[in-house]
Image (cartoon, rainbow, N blue to C red):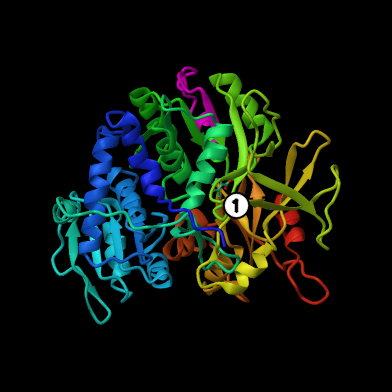
Amino acid sequence: MVAAESFNASVYLLDRQVEAGRGDHLAVTGPAGDVTYTELATLVQAAAAGLAELGLRPEERIVLFSADRVELLAMFLAGLRMGAVPVPVSTMYLDTELAELLHDSRARLLFTSPEFADTARSALAKVSSVWTLIVTDDVPPVENAGEKPGGWCPQVTWSELIGVGTGKDSPVYDTWTESPAFWLYTSGTTGIPKAAMHRHGSVRYVAEHYGQQVLGITPDDRCFSVAKLFFAYGLGNSALFPLSVGATAVLDPVRPTPQSVATRIAEHSPTLFYGVPTFYAAVLAADLPADTFAGVRLATSAGEALPTELYRRFTSKFGVDILDGIGSTEALHIFLSNYPGQVRPGTTGRAVPGYDLRLVDDEGKVVPPGTPGNLQIRGGSLTTGYWCRTETTRNAFVGEWMRTGDTYVQDEEGYYVCLGRSNDMIKAGGIWVSPAEVEACLLKHPSVAQAAVVAVPDEAGLDKPVACVVPAPGQTIDPDALIEACRAELAAFKRPRTILEFSTLPTTATGKLRRFAVRDEALL
Ligand code: 3SK
C-alpha cells in the first residue's frame, strides 16, 4: 500500500509563504485594508485554536455564510488547518434555504457577517444541529436571539474567538492529500442542493494546473473576482490561486456592479480579473471609460459560454483579453479553457493540463471530432462524491470519468464548442437553476395550472429562466404577482425574468412535457 502523503491545504497556502520569506507580502487587500501573509497566518492559527475551544472537532462542518472579507477567508483556512470541514454557502439563499443546508450538513458552527446576520439567525431558529453562531465584530447584538429547536444557540464574536485562541497551541491536524477538506453546495435537478466534497490535495491540484499553468499566476499578481468566495470559481480565483504563489487577493464585501468594480480596480490595481459573461455584458452596457481595466494583464470568464460578440466588444473596447473556460463545483475549478495568446472566440478552448476530456454518445461510445457528444472529464480535483447522495454520486460517475451534463463538439484542432446542456438544468448568470424547483413554486399559486421553466437567451445571447404558465380555469395570470411569489420563496437568482402565458404546453404522446418545444415557443 502507498503511504498517505501528509498534506494540509491551509499550511500549503499560508505557512509555506511565510516560510518562503513572503511574510510581509500582502495576502489580502480591499476596502477594509491590507493584511500580510504573517498577519493572516497569525489570525488563522488563533481562529483554529478558538474553533477547537468551541468544541469543533476534525471532520465536523462549519458553515460560512458571509460577505467576502478577511474573517471569511481566515475562517475557511482555520477550518482546514484543524481538519474540520468549512462549507462556504451562497449568501443569496433565503433563511429556509440556508436552514436546509444547515440541516443537511449537520453543521456544528455557523459564521456570518452583518449583511446576512438576520437571515442566519432566522435559519438557526429552524434547525437543532448548530451549537454556536460566530459573528464578525460589526454585527449588532440582538436581544433574545439564539432560540432554536430544543435549545439555545449562543453567539460569539470574531474578537472573542480570536481572544480565546490567541496564545493557545494551534497544532495542524495531520491531514493527508486524501483527507476531507471542504464542501461546496450545488443545485440538483430537483432543486435540493447537494454538497460536493473536496479533498486537501485538490487545492494544490487546481492551483498548480489551472492557476499556475494556464493563468501563469505569480507573486506579483493581484487577483480580483466578481464571483464571491462561496462559489468554487471565486474560491479558486480569490483564495486558492493567489495564496498558492504568495500573490494578493482583492476582497470586496459588496455585490459587484460595473461601477463598484471600476472603483475597486482604480483603488487596488488588479492584474488578473475574473468575470462571468453576464457581468461582461453589464460592463459594456454601463459604458465605462475605455481605460477602466488598464493594468489588468488578463481576464477570465466561466459559468456559461461567452458569446463571440461579447468577447469582441469587450476586448476591443478595453484592450484586455478574456480566457473563456468552463469548470464545475464538482471539479473544483476550470478543466477546459482558452490559453493566453491562443484564444479562439466562441470556443471554450482546450483541456487544462491535468485533465482528460472525452465526448461520448448516449450509449457511452466516444465520438470523433465534428460530432456532438456529452462531455465527460477525468482529473485529480474531482469531488469524492456528494454528501449523503449515494445514488446521485454513482450516476455522476462512469468509473473515474465524471459526466458534466454539457453537450460539446470538438474541432480538428482540439478546440471545444459548447452546444448546451444535456439535461434540463439552466445556468443563469453562471449559477445553476433547477426548473423543477421554480415550477413547484409557481404551481403553488392559485392562478397557475401548469408551469414549465426554460432557458431563453437575452439580447446579449445569455440564458435566463423564463416561466411558461397555463392559467387555472377561471383565473388570469398576473406576471408581477408570480415573480413576487417566487421572490418570497426562492433566492433571487432563481426567479423567472419573464412570465409567458400559454393556453396549453406541448407534451409527448405519453403526456411528458416537451421542454425543447416549450423553449422554441418561448423564443417566438
Ligand atoms: O461554472 C463554471 O464554469 C465554474 C468554473 C470554475 C469553478 C466552478 C464553476 C462552477
Reply yes or no: does residue 484 show up in magenta.
Answer: no
State whether label 1 is within 8 Å of ligand 1: yes
Residue name at image x 68 percent, y 32 percent:
308
| Extent of the magenta region | 281-299
Residue 195, x across and y down, in percent: 49, 63
**Amino acid at dot 1:** Lys
Q: Nearer the viewer, residue 257 or 194?
A: 194
Judging from the image, what secondary structure is the residue with disc 1 in? Answer: strand
Residue 41, x across and y down, in percent: 27, 42
Q: Which residue is mark 1?
A: 427
Residue 337 vertical placement versus 295 (above, below) = below
Seen in the image, is 325 located left or right of residue 236?
A: right
Residue 40 vertical placement versus 63 (above, below) = above
Residue 523 visible from this viewpoint: yes
Q: Nearer the viewer, residue 278 or 67?
A: 67
**Residue 248, located in which quarter of the rendered image?**
top left
Residue 476, x across and y down, in percent: 58, 67
Residue name at image x 30 percent, y 55 percent:
116
**Residue 105, located in which quarter of the rendered image?**
bottom left
Farthest bottom residue? 150
